[in-house]
Amino acid sequence: MNKDILICGVGGQGTVLASKIIAASASIAGYQIHSAETIGMAQRGGSVTSHVRIGDSVYSPLIPRGRADLLLAFEPAEAVRNLGYLQKGATAIVNTAAIRPVTESLAETGYDGSKMVRYLADKCTCIFVDADRVCAPFGSSRFFNIVILGIAAGSNRLGISEDILLEQIEKRVPAKYTGINKEAFNVGLEFGREEALTGQIM
Amino acid sequence: MKEYIMGNGAIALGALCSGVNLVSGYPGTPSSEIVETVYKYPHEGVYLEWSVNEKAALEVAAAAAYSGARALVTMKQVGLNVASDALMSLAYVGVKGGLVIVSADDPGPISSQTEQDTRRFADFCRIPVFDPSTPEEAFAMTGDAFECSEKYHTPVLLRPTTRICHAYVSIDVPDSFSPWKYEGFIKDSKRWVVFPGLSYMNHGMIEERNAGIAVDFSKYRFNHVEGTSPKAVVTSGVSYAYVKECLKDRQDIRIIRIATAFPFPREFILHAMSGVSEVLCIEELSPYLEEQILKTAGMHHLNITVHGKLDGSVPQNGEMSTELAAGILSGFLDIELSVELIDTGDAPQLPVRPPVLCAGCPHRASFYAVKKAMEGRKAIFCGDIGCYTLGNAMPLDMVDTCLCMGAGITMAQGFAHTSDDAVCFAFVGDSTFFASGMTGVVNAVYNEADMILCVLDNSTTAMTGHQPHPGTGKNMMGNIVDKVDIAKVLDGIGVKSIVTVDPLDLKASVTAIKEAVEQKGVKAIIFRSPCIAVSKPQAKCSIDPSKCVNCKKCIKETGCPAIIIAEGRVRTDENMCTGCGLCSHVCPVSAIGGGPNE
């Protein structure tokens, strides 16, 4: 299997953990893995990306533009910002709930993500999910990083077994949040399965 | 065992596998995780420290290497500038045990002040440098660097770049490590005391030795050539990975990869370039290889054309990438390498996301207090290196200058001597204060500067990942140690006015600043409150919609990312708010409750 997965979002959303879980799971499934993270100043509320590269013929630690097989976008504008990495015809799983930067609150340009969502729907195959709504039962949208893994696995777009993923989730989240993260993963799985079943692009 | 580990971790494990006895460093992106990885793995018998700055780290390690021990020193590229005083002399004196200095370069730059090139530093100091293209190579080259250092009795540089440091790969590592056996320091003043006579003699010997290392490097396994085409691509570091990514289906194209920029492996390059008519150099930062190729062509009367940064074929600044390399290679080789992209030329305007101070960051409160206290007065705000550099952003706009570690303190003095009517402030973090701020305070006291020093003491080195420092009472040997007290240091230096306040107490902070402004000489205010990223949040703040008049003053004055506008109304984001309560002091109608006040 050769698969390039780009994860993007805003510093603090838990993209790095999602990347680590995918990488560790793919490695356990027997694949060669390379990944790269945004670390440093950009983590303070800036745009962040994780590049996960599965397969043997990988040289660059970063996915070249136009080559990603899957885009996991934790924020709609970040999805658009990184759309150039996605292969033509590939899928993006996108959180539609916008994160408005402080500069936005100051300038009030009216950014709410809706324009981004409409644009994305035109440009690629999208699975849209409202992180705030889907994470409401967990009391915080910070569990979205696990939900989106569930969606990717449930819609058969990850190519890694659910059991291996779940095992790595259990291993990598703080013990007192294991239950809630498992639940978040299952919610994602259901969401993804339904999408795969109906083939409905939301 | 197989470990999935980042490039920095690979360097740490490479050092442990080489039996490293001592590891020292100063945190700096992208190098910080090397020392931390050594700490995480079993390292019995290894002495480990976060030094007070890079110069101290190198000097500690140099003594270990004089004793025959193997030592690793880590820093970011600008840290090498700090360590350079020691390094230049050390290059002349040499070492006995292996000494490897990791200086991580940051093309882009992504988290740095400069796009300097450590390969040039190696050339300047006349010491060898290893330049890995992958984390796997960084692991292997760490061991090679130790051997090279011992064989030639010289400090050796290892130069990874951000993309290598922060890339993750699987690496096979042994289950346990055993430290190198060494004999200890043997006195020999003719060897270890740097005198002009010794430097004269060693200078000649070093140049002779370097010629020998260049011959050695010509056989080095990571200097290699692939393909036979008359057009050759010369590359190094992560650029080699990008070039390979572009040309993985073109085994015919000649790719010459140089892993040891200095001493330049001239014999190898002459052999690798035989039959070549045109060369393209793809490298980041400076055109170092390109200049070496040109020099070689001149020395050997080679009839080749050289393309790269110097003729404009490759950009002078910024990072290389696969797509940038693809474009350059397409033109040079006259082949099609680009892939069809989703057209994003018509994308809606994207919100910008500059990095900001965290919600609840005490630095925001400190800056806000100074801003309030100085309303209507002329003031100059000298910033420094750390999270608090972000105090420059709107709406705080409280950083007028930022140059290098510790510069704010001394620059505030320069402004004080050249501007009669401005109150001159220096903001410095606790770790930076210890790293290179203290001597600046001595300078201020001695030279009678009129300035206010604001130490933003959050009890950690926050920007680089919360490393301990002399003020935290913990060290990397896992020991609880006496805290070096910043107020006592300032008192010892002779600062007459030293006040410690909690920046989250806005009223007390503003009063302290106003009082300091009225005094002459050097005044210090220590704003002490722990970094919010590593402390327990207080009760959260909330905005009472029945009282809120939607004036947005809380957002416009503080720029806190936890205050948002939803459906036209201002509210706090409960996920982000830490209850620092700064906004409640700003609100003109007392609509914000919660936080430390309730």
Image: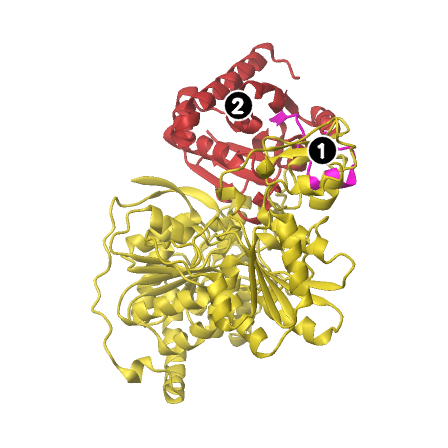
Chain colours: A red, B yellow
Answer above or below: position of B445 versus B228: below
User: Which residue appears at 34% of the width and 53% of the height?
Assistant: B480
Comparing marks 1 and 2, which lies closer to the viewer? 1
* Name of the residue lying farthest toward the bottom: B197
Q: Secondary structure at mark 1?
A: loop
Answer above or below: position of B336 versus B267: above
Answer above or below: position of B219 versus B187: above
Q: Of B132 and B326, which appears nearest the observer?
A: B132
* Residue segment shown in magenta: A92-112
Q: Which residue is mark 1?
A: B591
> On the rendered image, what quadrant is the N terminus of chain B found in?
top left
> On the rendered image, what quadrant is the C terminus of chain B found in?
top right
Answer above or below: position of B230 versus B154: above
Asked which quadrant contains residue B385, the reply is bottom right
Residue B270's x, y, as percent?
46, 67
Badge 2 density bin: few <14, some 14–19, many ≥20, Cα 10 Å: many
Callout 2: chain: A
Callout 1: chain: B
Q: Of B529 and A110, which appears nearest the observer?
A: B529
Asked which quadrant contains residue A108, the reply is top right
Q: Of B575 and B8, which appears nearest the observer?
A: B575
Residue A125's x, y, as percent?
64, 23
> Is residue B81 something one can see in this rendering?
no
User: Which residue appears at 37% of the width and 83% of the height?
Assistant: B194
Residue A165's x, y, as percent?
43, 25
Kindly check if marks 1 and 2 are in contact, taking CB atoms under 8 A apart as contact: no
Residue type, mark 1 in image: Ala
Q: Secondary structure at mark 2?
A: helix
Q: CA distance from mark 1 to mark 2?
A: 36 Å
Residue B276's x, y, as percent?
53, 61
Q: Which residue is mark 2?
A: A147
Total marks in image:
2
